[in-house]
Amino acid sequence: MAISLFVFGVFLVVASNLSSVVSEWSRKIQVTFFLEDGLASHIRASLENRLRDDRAVDSIEYVTREQAVQRFRSMFRDLSGLPEDLGESPFPASLEVTLRLSREAPQEVERLVRDYGNAPGVEEVQYDLLWVQRLFTAIRLMRWVGGLLGGVLVLASVFTISNVVRLTAYSRQDEIDIMRLVGATQSYIKGPFVVEGMVQGGLGGALAVALLWLSFHYLARDLLASSHVLGHAVVFLPYGLSLVIIGGGMGVGIIGGYLSLRRVSA
Amino acid sequence: MIQAFHVYKHYDRESSALTDVTLQIKKGDFCFLTGPSGAGKTTFLKLVFREELPSQGQIIVGGRNITAIPEKQIPELRRSVGVVFQDFKLLKRKTVLENVAFVLRLLGLPPKEQKRRAFASLKSVGLHHKMHAYPLQLSGGEQQRVAIARALINEPMLLLADEPTGNLDPDMAMEIMALFQDVNARGTTVLVATHDREMIQRMAKRVVALDRGRLVSG
């Protein structure tokens, strides 16, 4: 039981960290609209306003030609003299549009390109749809694996607890029979067993969180020496999720305790 | 109080524990159910408090057709019937007092009242001095008396007793019968399964006789 919840907890730690990484990455879902040279500022402003009102858009950054050169210089120090060599800045001004993180982001990228690609003042649009699609496939896969793993582990826990409680119930079968014969209701008889399941489940959950915490602090963190994965700090489960594991353990225990008696006392 | 109509009970295909039993026991009656071992006495009692269902036929107890009542109403039926089981059926992990008080606990009576009445019931069977003992520390006869105290504590509408004096000496057996008569006088219908002919003769009550699952008299 504790082991099932522990494995589930490990998955939750990984998943919660990965989802932070993903949300970090998803900030990179950008569509860049390169603007025509010498574009009148009111045309640019109207394009910016239209984009800002779009439901898919999270933020917009206007990058001037000069800023583009600066960026190039800071990114490629060896080539910092190149713009001067060329005589004039080869970089056009642009609007960098960051999308909201949503399930429809890949379709939204396509729509934005379609809707605004030919707007007045837009010279070219740059985007990486494949990257976006891969990212979202990865997120979907993670959710599926998580759901599946969670489901299997919950079932395993229910089965384990119901068997443990059933063993107790078998050893007290005579007592259960007598209680029934003198008029005890089903709930009166089942109550203590359900409570037993709940306590066991809760303890299993608490043990799992404790094990998880210990292994996180003494093993996993050392392994991930710098404690950074893809530029993101690895953190332990949020407080709420730890409670979810304990509460989930109790819930699973209640179900297990209840199921165990269906056959015993029937 | 008890009406049985053409009741059959088969445990397997070849043999029949009860065959076409039709009888009526009126409210307030005191009745013996007799017959040799294997006659079907215990089976009949089991059907009356719904430990088992008849294979065929109808049984009405206290105006309710117990062959048709929903599962949920069974505990209520059992709480209104006091049963002295042949094998006593005492809770081994509870003291004598707790065993007797258990029925009242199920009824939700306050703990003080449970104890007070359990003590009184144990006193009536002469076992109040052993109230803190556990069933396995008692002799067979004493366990039987605890089972009787438990069956009587709630002044049930119906008392079923399966060989309640089987383990008792004749004096104690007569004392228990006197107790049954008292409770009967207060309105409880009493049905006692026994093959103790001497006692049946001494008590001079109605006798229903079974033989190999069939009603032969009564």
Image (cartoon, rainbow, N blue to C red):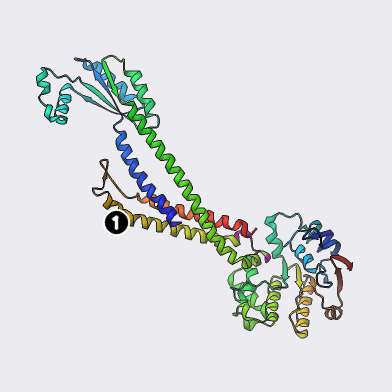
Taking B187 as reference, is B199 above or below it? Answer: below
The residue drawn where x is 35% and y is 33% is A135
Judge whether A151 appears above or below B153 on screen: above
Element type at marker 1? helix
Crowding at label 1, few (<14), some or many (≥20) Cα neighbours within 10 Å?
few
Identify the image quadrant of residue A43.
Answer: top left
Q: Is residue B21 magenta?
A: no
Dot 1 amino acid type: Tyr
User: Which one is in front, B138 or A56?
Assistant: B138
For image coordinates 70% across by 78% down, the residue present is B145
Residue A74, position in %: x, y?
14, 30
> What residue range appears in magenta?
A181-187
Left or right for B44, reference A4: right
Q: Residue A49: which quarter of the image? A: top left
Along the viewing direction, whichever of A222 and A41 lies nearer the viewer: A222
Q: Which residue is mark 1?
A: A218
Write down the quadrant of residue A162 in the picture: bottom right
Give percent across and percent down for residue B199. Answer: 83, 80
What number of labels is visible?
1
Q: Position of residue B156 (x, y in %)?
A: 73, 68
